[in-house]
Amino acid sequence: MKKKVLVIEDNEQNLYLTTFLLEKNGFAVVSAKNGHEGILAANEIRPDMILLDIQLPQIDGYTVARRLRKNRELDNVPVVAVTSYAMVGDRERALESGCSGYIEKPINPDTFISEVKKYFKEAVEKKGEDKK
Ligand code: MN
């Protein structure tokens, strides 16, 4: 079965590129254009990973991450912030909000998938440790 990635992203171009790269590499993609939609989708479809843009309309990515983390059924789902390099302090805030890590914007098509896979691997390892 294909792994499902929920992409919460309001920018068309970023969403297009992210979706293209993920699908090309065998992932199934579900997208949401704002935080509210993203939280609903996460609860509904139980994705294997959530890629979360931080700069979103209405509620920002930090708030979305904190709300996602309240749902214990999503405990093992990595939430990866997608933040622009210029935003100093974003990463720390993202981690404090419950994100598992971050991927830098602009998306680098050459490294994006390996970063996604790295977070999948970390999540699997973490799940194994929790069981011990
Ligand atoms: Mn955005």
Image: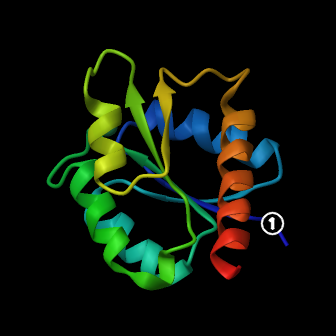
**Measuring 75% from the left and 55% from the top, which residue is drawn there?**
27
Outermost residue, left side: 58
4 to the left or right of 34: right
51 vs 71: above or below: above
The residue beneath circle 1 is: 2
Ligand 1 picture quarter: top left
Pinpoint residue 40: horizontal percent, then vertical percent.
36, 76
Q: Nearer the viewer, residue 28 or 80?
A: 80
Q: In the rendered image, which quarter contains the N terminus? A: bottom right
Query: In the rendered image, which quarter is residue 70 located in?
Result: bottom left
61 to the left or right of 131: left
Query: In the rendered image, which quarter is residue 124 located in?
Result: bottom right
**Measuring 49% from the left and 76% from the top, which residue is drawn there?**
74
**Measuring 75% from the left and 48% from the top, which residue is drawn there?**
23
30 to the left or right of 105: right
Query: In the rendered image, which quarter is residue 34 located in?
Result: bottom left
Pinpoint residue 71: horizontal percent, then vertical percent.
38, 81
Pinpoint residue 132: horizontal percent, then vertical percent.
71, 79
